[in-house]
Structures are given as structure tokens and as C-alpha cells.
Amino acid sequence: MKRVVIPMVVLALIAYALSGMYSVGPSQRGVQTFMGRPAGMPRTPGLHIHAPWPIGGVRLVDVSMVRSTNVKFEWPGERGHRCYLLTGDENVVELALQVHYVVSDPVVFVYADKRPDVLLGMAARADSVAILSGMGVDDALTIGRPVIAARLKDWMNRTIARHLGVQVTSVLITKLTPPVQVRAAFAAVASAKADQARRINDAYGDRNRRLPRARANALNIQTTAQAKVRELLDRTQGWIDAFNRSLLRYKAAPMVTMTALLTSELPRAIGRVHLILVDPAKVGTLFLGGLPPPYNQVVTGSTGHRK
């Protein structure tokens, strides 16, 4: 009898001692316990052993899995009854979130509250109220989504997340809209602002197209005007110099200079005069070429007037 019992007891003791062997997967960490308390650092992937039950135990925690929780804003104890959040300019909006997190400290995660989703949701609601109270409704509905998400993530990681042994990786805003009663008005305002922005962009684009052309035209006009001014100044200076030379010659020899001027300028002046000799005894119409009507017709004779 003893020969049978003793080997069986030994085998049972060996099996009991080996019952503490366990393996940790690649994405897991093992939290060993001894008498209900954590025993050392979390175990890395591989084969390990702990004290047999009930003296020791192990909790395997997946540290690579991304967990998530949906956060809705409802009245306590009344599911389906939405509550609105007040913005900084005393408007109201509807908000819904999705918080994604991973386990950052397996030991804290094992011994912390068994409802991390609930606590993270409560923290997200409180932080959302604080953030929206400092923003206007226009900013919240347009450029405020990434700002709200980033602030929520930062605030939750600095407050409650580390006490739960988790790290918030991202916050997704699944809903951020005005109430149904005024949604059409907000949509009209948003459309008007988008149209205003489009018109401003079109105006700036037209300005950018016209401005280089206008500057080139202005530079061309300025260059042409400067060249014309230089030409006129040079021509005028030439006339002044010629007059001064004539004046000096006149002062030196008045009669000689006057005779020379009359000799040179009088034929030029007379050459511009056209003389028409009409016989007063003849009556009729004389046509003058090169002049527009009615100046090209002259009635000759007793009447003696122009038509």
C-alpha cells in the first residue's frame, strides 16, 4: 500500500509545483502575485513559473491591444435623453466621443478599478465641459474638432489615465453638431461663411492676376513719360541755345542779324500762305481741293460770300 501511496503523493506534489508554470505571449505581460500582492516586475514574453495556487497566481494582460470606449452625454439614469454642452458664447452643442487607449502599466491596470471604461468616460465628460466652456460655437463647429480632441487626450493622460495604468492614444469626435432645432440656421450660416471665404479667395486671386500687369503697365507708362520728358527738355534746350546764339549775334550786329533772319525766315513763312485770285466779274462757284465741305466752295461774282 505504501509503495503505491507514496509515489502517488510525490507525483501529486510535483504536479502541484508544476501547476505554476505558464507562458506569456508576444503581446502580453504577466503580473505575478504572491499572497494577493504583486510579485516583482511584469513578466516579459516567454516561459515562467509562479508559486502554486492559492499562494500565487498570474494575470496576463495584453499591452498591444487598442481598447476603446464610447462616451455619450446623457442625463444620469435616463438613457436616450441627450444633454447639451454649453459653449463659451452661451450656445449649445451635441457631443459624442470615442476614446482609444492601451495598457501602459500592467500592474496598476490589474489592481486598479475594474471599470476603466466608466472612469475614462466620466473624465472625458468633465474635461469636455471645461474645454467647450472656453470656446465659441463657431470655432467648436469648424476648427475646434482637432483642438478639442488634442486637449482631451492631454488632460486625460495627465489626470486619470496614469492612475488606471492606461495611456489614451487618441480621442475621436464622432458627433459635434448644434441641436436639431437650430441645425438648419447653423448650416445656413456655415454656407454663408464658406461663400464669403470663396469670394475673398477669388478677389485675392483676381488681385494677384491684375497687380503684376498693372505694375508692368505703370512702369511702361513711367518709362515712356520719362523718355518724352527728356526728349522735350533736349528739344527745348536746343531752342534756347539757338535763341541765345541769335540774341548774341543780334546784340553784336543788329541790322545784319535782322536782315539774315528776314532772309531766312520770311520765305518759309510766306511759303505756308496760299493766295487765290478771283475775278470779281465772273459769277459762279469755285471749288477748292484739299478742304472739307462747305469750305471747299466759294461763290464768286456779285454776291461775294462763302457757303
Image (spheres, rainbow, N blue to C red):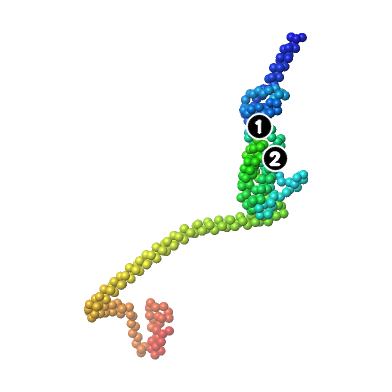
Q: Position of residue 77 (x, y in %)?
A: 77, 44
Q: Read off the residue under disc 2.
A: 119
Identified at 69% across, 37% down, the residue is 116
Residue 107, numbered circle: 1
Q: In which quarter of the image is residue 123?
A: top right
The secondary element bearing badge 2 is classed as helix
The secondary element bearing badge 1 is classed as helix
Q: State which quarter of the image contains the C terminus.
A: bottom left
Going by the numbered disc 1, the residue's amino acid type is Val
The image shows residue 285, relative to residue 8, as above or below, that is: below
Identified at 64% across, 51% down, the residue is 134
The image shows residue 20, relative to residue 170, as above or below, that is: above
Q: Which of 302 and 193 is in front in this view?
A: 193
Q: How crowded is mark 1: few (under 14 residues within 10 Å), some or many (20 or more)?
A: many
Identified at 31% across, 70% down, the residue is 237
Can the viewer see residue 263 in this picture?
no
Compute the Cα span from label 2 to label 1.
18 Å
Identified at 69% across, 25% down, the residue is 56
Q: Where is residue 271 in the image (x, y as percent from the top left)?
A: 31, 78
Going by the numbered disc 2, the residue's amino acid type is Leu
Q: Quadrant of residue 235?
A: bottom left
